[in-house]
Amino acid sequence: MRAGARRAAIAAVVIVGLVVLGAVPRVRRAHALDLSAREDSLAGVRVTVAMAHRATAAGDLALTGTVQALHETNVYARSSGYVQKWTSDIGSKVKANQLLAIVETPDVDRQYDQAQADLMRAKTTETLAKRNLDRWQRLERDSAVSAQELDEHQSAYDDASANVNAARANVGRFASLKGYANVTAPFAGVVTARNVDVGMLVAPATTPGTRGLFTIAQTDTVRIMVSVPQAQVAAIKVGGQADIVLPDGGHTVKGVVARTSSSLDAAARTLTVEVDAANKDGVLLPGMFGEVHFHLTGGSPPVRVPSGALVFRPEGTQVAMVGPDDVVHFIKVTLGRDYGADVEVLADVPDGARLILNPSDDVVDGLKVHVIGNVDSKDK
């Protein structure tokens, strides 16, 4: 019995020892994980950064622009009426003052006839007032009437003359409206829209909800509007050359910087630049986009950032920059040329800025992070 009890006690001691030996590593690992978690909470999210760098030379600046007609306007009717016929459809090239449509204006015609009748009545009244005035002037010279009576007839004649002038002006107004029954092109160009058909009721532009009968665009010369970032503004000169590359396989059109807005958009930090280009063959159509290549002669070259630093969000493309205090600041950027590993960005990203590579969802604006690695983007 004693030998069995000793063996049982020894077995119990061995089992307890094994349990203790197995529990100690688990406790140590749990303690290490807890310590690591506390260190992470104190140090912030761990991130790897890469440096932004400025290109060595300015070279050419390529930006997307929108083609617009040099002049474009909607043509409205000046008189209410019905379209009798139209002569030009979309795509038609028209000359200045060329007939586009004829509008029947029965209401204006009747108003014109009434205005002429009012003018004849006013002239009759004026003639009678003039004869009466002549009689009373002769009587006044013979002292047969008073000066007050003469003044009254003079006033009646002046009033009749004024009515004649007003009636004559009214006739001229309706004559002009009758003349506007012929809708003509205000300048030479191309019809880009036709909103009328035979029999349609049209109204003047002053009527709410009225659409233009035609849209005319002058496209022999077009303008391309481009937003140039602040870093390249100094290199853009009025009169400078620019190439417009179309997305049709590389067709290129020569252009000239015609003017700038001379003021930057405070939100985007960009300058609106107009590039004019001859368009005799009509390859540049209003509304299309093209890549405008400016030949830079000065200014600062753009900043390049690693492709992995770009963050695509609903509010736009951004980069997460780590400041000297290790606090994250998101900066909205506009993409320039893509070099594969690097991409030009058009924004206030300083040269040498630390940008987080592939930031996780935990990285938010204002968060303090712990930088654990630094990759030189130029050596990638």
Image: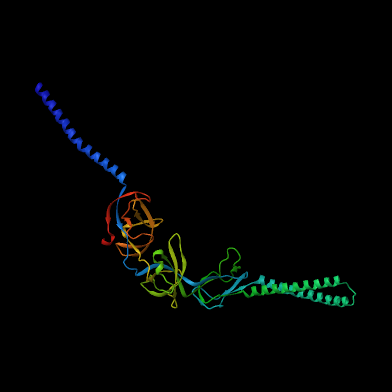
257 left or right of 183 in image:
left
Place residue 196 in its image quadrant. bottom right
Residue 117 seen in render:
no
Residue 316 place in picture, x, y as percent: 40, 57
Quick one: 296 or 184, which is closer to the camera?
Answer: 296
Q: Residue at x 11, y 24 (%)?
A: 6
User: In this view of the protein, which residue sits in the foreground, 123 or 182?
Assistant: 123
> How many labels, in total?
0
In the rendered structure, the answer to whether residue 119 lies left or right of residue 97 reads right
Could one spot residue 21 in this view of the protein?
yes
Quadrant containing the C terminus in the rendered view: bottom left
- When asked about the image quadrant of residue 331, the answer is bottom left
Q: Is residue 373 left or right of residue 220?
A: left
Residue depicted at x 22% and y 38%:
28
Question: Whole-percent x and y of residue 310?
Answer: 34, 58
Give the vertical position of 58 relative to 354 (above or below).
below
Residue 90, x across and y down, in percent = 50, 73
Q: Is residue 320 left or right of residue 225?
A: left
